[in-house]
Every structure is written in C-alpha cells, then in structure tokens.
Image: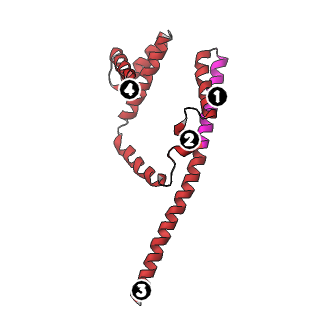
Amino acid sequence: MRDKKFFSLLVALIVGIFIGGVLMSILSMRASRVYLEIVKTNYKQEQEMLGDQLWKSGKLSEAAVHYSNVVQAISGADMKSLSPDHAWSFGFPFTAIILNEIKNKADVSGRGRAFDEGVARGKLGMVLESLGRNDEAQREYSSAAKLTGMNEIDRVKKFIIGLNAK
C-alpha cells in the first residue's frame, strides 16, 4: 500500500513537471515573438533617426542606406532572421540555454567578436574606397587591421577580397 502511494505521488510529480515545462515553453514562445517585434521596431526607429540626421547634414548616400534598412524592417524583405517563425519553436527555450553556454565559453576573450567587427569594417572600407571616399576608407581599414590582428592595411584588403571571391 505504501509503495503504491509513493509510486502515485512520483508519477504525479513527473507529470506536473512535464506539464509545467510545456506551459513555460508555450509562454516563452509567445514572449519571444513579442520581443522580436520590439527589436524590429527599435531597429526601424534607430535607422530612421540616423537617416534623418544624415539627410539634414547633406550626406544623402549614407541616408539612403539607413532609409533602405527602414523599408526592409517594415516590409520584412530580407529580414528572415527577425521573423517570429524563423527559429522560435517549442524547443527554443531549451536550445537557447545550450546555445548561450556555448557562446559564453567559445569567445571568452572577445577576440572573435573583435575579428567580426574588423571584417565588417574592412568590407565597409572597400565600399567607401570604391565610392571615392578614401579618407573614410583608410580610417575603416586602420580599425580593421587592429581588430583582426593583421596590423597591415594591405593584408586586410587582400583578406576581404578573398572573402568576397567565395
């Protein structure tokens, strides 16, 4: 009799934990969708403000880039990563915990993030140079060289050209 009561209690506990996990996952999915909409709205507003500032200061080509980002944020074109249906599934809360641990242990020094920023600055430098904005391009190349650890602008340029060739 005592074993039967203990077994019943154990089953009820396991079922309760399972149901609680399912409910938390459902709530998390809904909260995540709302959060993505907030991120999209903030991104749109930030890009619009930057576009307005650049337009007023006469930097029209730069303003056009920011306004293009606003259009994409509103229309959803090319913004699949911010779509609520992209990666938000029932298992996402559990996956997020694992991914967060991997991220925290993978780049403890921050070197990977710095390298990514360096590559982005190198690409920006290439575009600016192509537009004839050489002073701005040189500043971006210098930052890229420091961030990537390449230390030479020519090495950064060759690296970026190699990335874009793939």
Q: Which residue is mark 2?
A: 83
Disc 4 on helix, strand or loop?
A: helix
Residue at figure coordinates x 63%, y 33% from the top left? 75
Q: Nearer the viewer, mark 3 or mark 1?
A: 3
Residue at figure coordinates x 40%, y 34% from the top left? 113
Residue 59 in view: no
Mark 2 Cα-neighbour bin, 10 Å: few <14, some 14–19, many ≥20: some
Q: How is the image coloured?
A: secondary structure
Residue type at mark 2?
Ser
Note whether 35 is above or below 62 in the view shown.
below
Disc on the earlier residue, 4 or 2:
2
Disc on the earlier residue, 2 or 1:
1
Q: Nearer the viewer, mark 4 or mark 2?
A: 2
Disc 1 on helix, strand or loop?
A: helix
Note whether 145 is above or below 129 in the view shown.
below
Q: Nearer the viewer, mark 2 or mark 1?
A: 2
Q: Which mark is residue 115?
A: none
Note whether 114 is above or below 23 in the view shown.
above
Residue 160 is left or right of residue 72, and the answer is left
Q: Which residue is mark 4?
A: 147
